């Protein structure tokens, strides 16, 4: 009997029922099993008119043709950690990247690479978390794809999201727009996400109550831009942390950025754990923080707007932009000296996002 | 010495030079090594103004705010096969999905999940192939992401692409729009891609000269829509093959589709290999073919337009749409009988795209 015909499901070669709570290779076939998985797991959670069209691409409308697009792969291990999971991360990471251009994130696509044997209950939990994050961010997941690889050829679940946002007319925000005299704001304490994932691996050798900060920041940005419409730069300090992200901006804008170490908020637990392990929290990844660089006259309004939002309650004014030493980030240390704050070189914490 | 500071690269802990021809975990750090990899491999190949902005998202302009978006994960094994590779596949797969809605594909994002130890030469070859395919399709790769997982936690290289296309005013094409009386066209012979990948794995037990058909179809679609502007359905029969894709359309449009088996073009080598292995070519994946369903009055123009394009030279009229038996695909066999052509059930050929 031809294995490709419908008889594949028949009595000659029955589908093993006990596999139906795990991902099997057939879930990646593009045939009936793929269809069943999509209906059961993805369509149930993400239902919206664009996705429900069930065509090869989703048809969408934007107020105008100026858009911002971005993509992020997510490979975090473990899949669940205090404060979040790979699903929330996959939605927030891309929502934030789109929002950092000043665009209004509207639509997401999601590609799932599943390892054979993944419990479907795990996938359902991740997908529910994605939908909750999408709702919080006010965006829709409009297209997706699912592939399955053999056991041992992936690590449970990888998710790649891409996002599309609408860019309002006249909005000019970018890493190349920091100017001498601008002021540098940080929306809250740094280092939580990286340390939370490390703690979830049980690799600390001790207990630590650290929660990831993973969150969608588009709402916070909306408030910020209403208060400080001439914001020059928005950037989220993810992999490589605050120090690396500031370096990227300094190079793009050909300015120096001077940061006051004592002004950078760091939670006491994060500081303690980093000290014990020899990590510098300025290089640890965040997933719910942003750097905003604003002209000096908008500093007070920007800071107030950030602090008025739950995701910016601990926002701080951490530094200034100067024209000398272009491309460099300088840290005024606690003891009053100044040192060069370079970008992260190699790997510090693998698989954190 | 703090491993996160620039001294990481210094004499105390030199970066092992012999690793620089392979992917190492540091390439996923978001720091200097990530930056170097992006410059060396990705920016060099994909250079364009939107990508070169080097911001968290790419800022783009479309003629209007009607768009189509799609995403596809690519996990093909092996990475290279006769007629293509994972890079060409990743570009063409998403270009085609966007184009099947009648949209003009313009922009792609690409997310790379790399296994530690992947030779950078392999990555460069794949990226060059992506750029060649992007140029052929007339689209730009405007945003990307790279993550690295430990050796054994992925299989070399996975690529997830997402695409954005502009949807011209008034264009109505979708799987739900097939109507009784419509005619079904296929742009060329089926089964090449799946069999080419299988052959590349050396699993056939014999030599077979089969080349993948992987190709961007947006140019072909442009010619088709100029000749047959009232085309109702466009769909590419990828995973699950022609039979599964026709079933999806029959269900979406609540019609039956009747196909003449003798009219479906199949290359002799593909037919022979399928017969030897017990595969039905109607269920084997294609990556450079499309199904077009057009109103009867536009059939001659549509067929001529397809045949005038290199990717449609062997196009054929393979069937008709009828109102009775909604949701079913019926095959008139070579010997004159009629049988139900169901969708693919489980997995036939894993990891072909």
Image (cartoon, coloured by chain):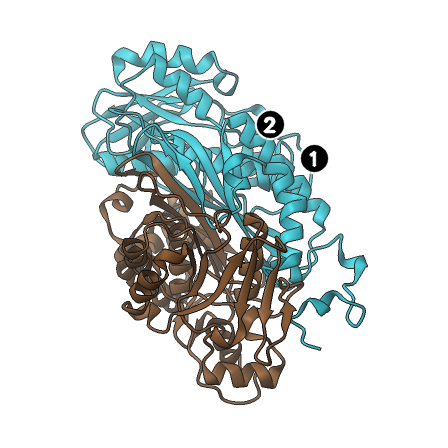
Chain colours: A cyan, B brown
Q: Residues within 10 Å of mark 1 (few under 14, many from 20)?
A: few
The answer for how far apart the CA atoms under marks 1 and 2 are is: 11 Å
Query: Residue A207's mark?
Result: 1
Residue at image x 39%, y 46%? B31
Q: Are marks 1 and 2 in contact (CB under 8 Å)?
A: no
Q: Is residue B82 left or right of residue B191?
A: left
The residue tagged 2 is: A269
Chain letter for the residue marked with disc 1 in the picture: A
Residue reaching furthest to the left = A324
Q: Is residue B281 above or below residue B68?
A: below
In terms of depth relative to the viewer, which is nearer, B68 or B8?
B68
In this view of the protein, can residue A201 be seen by the observer?
no
Q: Is residue A194 left or right of residue A118?
A: left
In terms of depth relative to the viewer, which is nearer, B211 or A287?
B211
Q: Secondary structure at mark 1?
A: loop
x and y, in percent, of residue A321 in the image? 26, 25
Query: Residue B314's mark?
Result: none
Q: Is residue B42 above or below residue A162?
A: below
Among the 4 quarters of the image, the one containing residue B5:
top left
In this view of the protein, can residue B53 be seen by the observer?
yes
Residue at image x 28%, y 32%? A174
In terms of depth relative to the viewer, which is nearer, B207 or B292?
B292
Q: Is residue A292 above or below residue B203?
A: above
Q: Is residue B296 left or right of residue A31?
A: left
Task: Work out whether disc 1 and disc 2 sit on a shared chain.
Answer: yes
Q: Secondary structure at mark 2?
A: helix
x and y, in percent, of residue A11 in the image? 81, 68
């Amino acid at each position: 009997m031809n294995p490709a015909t419908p008889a594949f499901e028949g009595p000659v070669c029955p589908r093993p029922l006990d596999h139906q709570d795990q991902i099997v290779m057939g879930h990646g076939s593009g045939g009936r099993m793929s269809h069943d998985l999509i209906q059961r797991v993805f369509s149930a959670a993400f239902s919206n008119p664009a996705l429900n069209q069930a065509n090869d691409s989703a048809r969408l409308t934007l107020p105008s043709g100026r858009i911002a697009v971005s993509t992020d792969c997510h490979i975090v291990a473990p899949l669940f950690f205090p404060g979040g999971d790979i699903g929330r991360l996959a939605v927030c990471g891309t929502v934030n990247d789109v929002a950092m251009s000043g665009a209004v994130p509207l639509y997401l696509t999601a590609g799932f690479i599943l390892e054979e044997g993944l419990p479907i209950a795990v996938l359902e939990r991740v997908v529910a978390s994605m939908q909750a994050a999408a709702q919080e961010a006010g965006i829709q997941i409009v297209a997706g794809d699912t592939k399955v690889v053999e056991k041992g050829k992936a690590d449970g679940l990888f998710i790649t999201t891409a996002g599309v946002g609408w860019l309002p007319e006249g909005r000019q925000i970018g890493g190349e727009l920091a100017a001498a005299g601008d002021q540098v704001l940080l929306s809250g304490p740094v280092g939580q996400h990286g340390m939370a994932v490390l703690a979830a691996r049980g690799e600390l050798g001790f207990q630590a109550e650290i929660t990831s900060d993973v969150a969608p920041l588009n709402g916070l940005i909306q408030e910020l831009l209403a208060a400080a419409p001439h914001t020059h730069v928005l950037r989220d300090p993810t992999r490589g942390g605050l120090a690396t992200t500031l370096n990227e901006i300094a190079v793009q804008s050909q300015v120096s950025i001077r940061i006051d170490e004592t002004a950078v908020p760091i939670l006491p637990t994060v500081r303690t754990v980093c000290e014990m392990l020899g990590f510098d929290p300025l290089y640890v990844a965040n997933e719910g923080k942003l750097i905003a660089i604003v002209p000096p006259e908008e500093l007070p309004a920007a800071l107030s707007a950030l602090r008025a939002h739950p995701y910016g309650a601990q926002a701080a004014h951490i530094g200034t932009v100067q024209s000398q030493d272009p491309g460099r980030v300088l840290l005024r240390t606690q003891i009053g000296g100044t040192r060069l704050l370079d970008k992260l070189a190699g790997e510090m914490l693998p698989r954190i996002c």
